[in-house]
Amino acid sequence: MANALANIPAESDVLCEGCGYVLNGLPDGANCPECGKPTSESAATLRHGAAWEQPGPALRRFISTTHEVLAHPTRFYRSLATRKTRESSNRFARAHWAIASVLLGVAAYAHFSWYLYLGNLPSALDRWNYTIPVTLIFAMIVYLMLSATTQVAGWLTTLEAGFWGMRLPLPVVLRGLDYHAAHYLPVALVSCATIVGYRLLVYWHLAGSLSAPMYLYVLCGEVILGAIYLFKTYWIGMKNMMYANG
Ligand SMILES: [Zn+2]
């Protein structure tokens, strides 16, 4: 079998952002011989650091970049400078991992305590003084999982991309995944609202006797939709970085 690794374009190769064709040596104002896209549209200068990496108040930079990643992922990744270090992007990721971890930690606590309540098991978790420590333990587990998953996803992406001859070295992939962490926010918010919302209905005796299976179906549906959403947005990121020249 041919070694696809040999066909990965070099860092110095200029690629067409439209189709990945190697544009080395073409004069200014030329078009891509493969897809006809003006080569100027593949210029490295069209890529820059995220708003998060610019000077200014941290909260504003954080919100602005989060909004851009969530609302315009294609535009965000199409204009992101891919060859910068991960120093700044990783801080963005850690902040999002922390937010998602707290939300999912609360959700995990609420779901677990409901589960024990459902089985009429005597539960230490129902005591309020256990709430915060147990939630924090759940949150820490989620944080470690998100951090580890990002690293593993980075390795697998680079491996897979190398096999298909795509120029996605690990530092580029990890930088992209750092910003992709913003997509955990809607997923964590929706699952937390569902679980805590249902837990409150049960607590206030507003949930009917048939509501438990319905709740679990909704939760399973959300897990599947969340996974699809995270994969689709991940792919938008990688697709818009694999022909990056800057
Ligand atoms: Zn092209």
Image (cartoon, grey):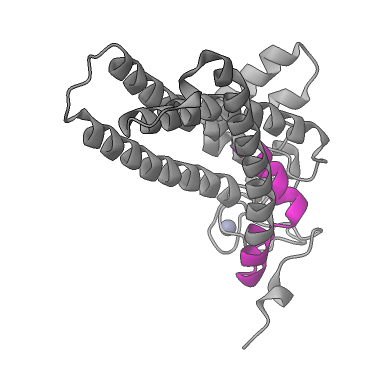
Residue 11: say if magenta: no
The percent position of residue 33, horizontal first and vertical second, equals: 59, 63
Quadrant that contains the N terminus: bottom right
Q: Which residue is depicted at the point 56% across and 53% down? A: 18
Depth order, front residue of 32/173: 173
Q: Is residue 46 left or right of residue 69?
A: right
The percent position of residue 206, horizontal first and vertical second, equals: 22, 14
Number of numbered discs overlaid on the protein picture: 0
Q: Which residue is depicted at the point 21% across and 29% down? A: 211
Depth order, front residue of 3/21: 3
Quadrant of the rendered structure where residue 90 is? top right
Instruction: Name the main secondary structure of what is drawn in magenta.
Output: helix
Residue 190 visible from this viewpoint:
yes
Q: Is residue 244 above or below residue 61?
A: below
Ligand 1 is found in which quarter of the picture?
bottom right
Q: Which residue is depicted at the point 30% across and 37% down? A: 216
- Stretch of the chain drawn in magenta: 157-180
Q: Is residue 218 left or right of residue 166?
A: left
Quadrant of the rendered structure where residue 180 is? top right
